[in-house]
Image: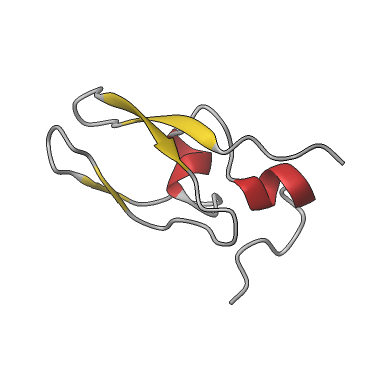
């Protein structure tokens, strides 16, 4: 099994600002505040986290288990 990629460039849909962020390895991130316009991003319907919705790389749980897994169960 390949180690997950931990960095993703997240792009704000409101202002277009892009920033490289390190993703958590043990949970999905449900909120992200754009450092440029302060818009709070939330996942799009059907996505588990903001990285899956707005990032260049899906979150580590999705990378490891795919979209059919229960990656964000708490």
Percent position of residue 55, x then y: 47, 33
* Quadrant location of the N terminus in the rendered image: top right
Q: For the view shown, which residue lies furthest in the left direction?
A: 37
- Image quadrant where residue 10 sits: top left
Check the image and report above or below for 3 versus 42.
Answer: above
Which residue occupies 77% across, 54% down? 68
Which residue occupies 45% across, 41% down? 22
Q: Which of 72 and 19 lies nearest the eye of the viewer?
A: 19
Which residue occupies 51% across, 27% down? 56
Which residue occupies 49% across, 32% down? 8
Percent position of residue 34, x then y: 22, 39
Q: Is residue 26 visible?
A: yes
Quick check: 28 left or right of 70? left
Q: Which of 17 and 4 lies nearest the eye of the viewer?
A: 4
Percent position of residue 14, x then y: 21, 31
Quick check: 59 left or right of 9? right
């Amino acid at each position: 099994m390949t180690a997950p990629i931990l960095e993703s460039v997240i792009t704000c849909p409101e202002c277009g600002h892009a920033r490289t962020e390190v993703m958590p390895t043990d949970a999905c991130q449900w909120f992200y505040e754009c450092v440029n316009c302060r818009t709070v991003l939330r996942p799009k319907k059907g996505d588990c986290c903001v990285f899956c919705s707005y990032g260049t790389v899906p979150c580590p749980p999705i990378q490891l288990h795919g979209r059919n897994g229960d990656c964000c169960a708490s």
